[in-house]
Amino acid sequence: MALRPSAWAVPLQDHKNLINASTHADAEGLVRQTFRWDLLRGFFHGVLTSGTQTFGLFIAIRYFDADLFSKSLIGSAPFIGMLFSLFLFHYAALTQLKNSVCGSLPVVLTGVFLILAATAGSLWTYTLWVVLGFMLLTAIIPFLTSIYHDNYPADRRGSLFAKAVLVTVLVSVLSGFLGSWAMDRDPNFYKWVLIALGVAGLGQGYAIWRMPSQKIEDHNLTNPFTHMKLVVQDRSFGYVLLTWFIMGFANLWVLPLRVDYLTSSTYGIEGSALFVATLITVVPDIMRAFSAPLLARLFDRMNFIVLRMIINVLFAFGVGLFFLTKNPYVIGLASALIGIAFGGGTVAWSLWVTKYAPPGKVAAYMSVHVFLTGVRGTLGPLVGFWTVQRIGAPAIGMVSFAMMMLATLMLIPEIKHGRGKHIPPAQVVP
């Protein structure tokens, strides 16, 4: 007796459903595994953030009487690492190692160098180890962005990443408070602060190493600067980078100045370690913790360019207000605005290229973005410390405000691309 077609159709449909369910389960398992290790990475990164934001420069000023060049170099170190990321990405791609391996090894070296900084007996030895440590910490960003792009679905990428950011800022608040409190009680405790930062570097390296990832993108290029042509080839991408450069320079050239403004005798505040850490780390990070989840959801759902414009305005008023007064409450308000802006700025800065880059080019696009951030972040503190000596703190705050508002207005023509230029790729399970 012949079988009816429906007798074959039902099992075949069940087989297709089984395959789809299995693929979905594998994809969700990949998301969960990535998310779990990223939370641990965020924990250790929170400890390190207190070092890059406050302790690295504070220790140099308070315990080693740092000169202008040393302060500028330490303030620029994370951004020198971003410059280095273009070369690291290029040569790492030749190895065909996984993104997780390429991202973990430099951070392990960060931990080693910061532990060595605790043994430094002079300003120059301390500066060398801290600068090397902070450089390698930020050089890995293109590898992490590629992992997020490959492992997180596009409609949840910002929200998932923001949860790790939330862990980072909460730990940063706690470590900033505890470290500064301990240094106020015992001046020699700064060595243990550096050791704690070093151990956090080792821990973050391990967490990144355990994150599932694919092999680094194979670009088959002989020149690490070849990716820079993306700025010209993708005109929309290049234009956003131009506005970001103006905005970022206005922010980054005053970033280490905020610590110097509250610490140095030049400006008459001379705050304690706890006072400085509260206004530079604790207050901004608390506000960042509150704002990050909301702004991350907006990143997933609203026009990215409009969101970027809102973040720019928050930065503009926060930075402009910070240097206008010595009143700690007004400075605290400015720090809160900066913290809210950073809540969205961290997500936007880390993930925006996933809306512009075509599949298979995310790390390349990100390496260009990070490199240009490194350019402005390296030059910014050097120019900032030189400029503030000539025009004063209030004036440099107003110049920053004007540059940020200009960058915001320049984004208006780009709003049409704010929803993303490329269709998100399908979830890929390694």
Image (tube, helix red, strand yellow):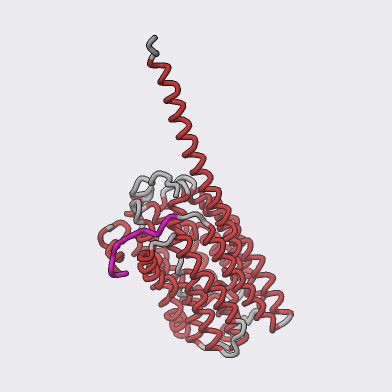
Residue in the image at 57% along x and 56% along y: 37
Q: Is residue 365 magenta?
A: no
Q: Position of residue 262 (x, y in %)?
A: 59, 78
Q: Quadrant of residue 410?
A: bottom left
Horizontal side of 307 relative to 267 (left or right) equals: left
Residue in the image at 29% along x and 70% along y: 223
Q: Position of residue 35 (x, y in %)?
A: 55, 52
Horizontal side of 238 relative to 279 (left or right) equals: left
Query: What stretch of residues is rendered in magenta?
Result: 214-224
371 to 64, vertically: above or below: above
Q: Position of residue 286 (x, y in %)?
A: 62, 61
Secondary structure mostly seen in magenta is: loop
Q: Position of residue 236 (x, y in %)?
A: 30, 56
119 to 348, vertically: above or below: below
Residue 77 appears anywhere in the view: yes
Q: Quadrant of the N terminus?
A: top left
Q: Quadrant of residue 192?
A: bottom right
Name the outermost residue toward the left. Answer: 233
Q: Nearer the viewer, residue 71 or 264?
A: 71
Residue 368 appears anywhere in the view: no
Q: Nearer the viewer, residue 86 or 28?
A: 28
239 to 124, vertically: above or below: above
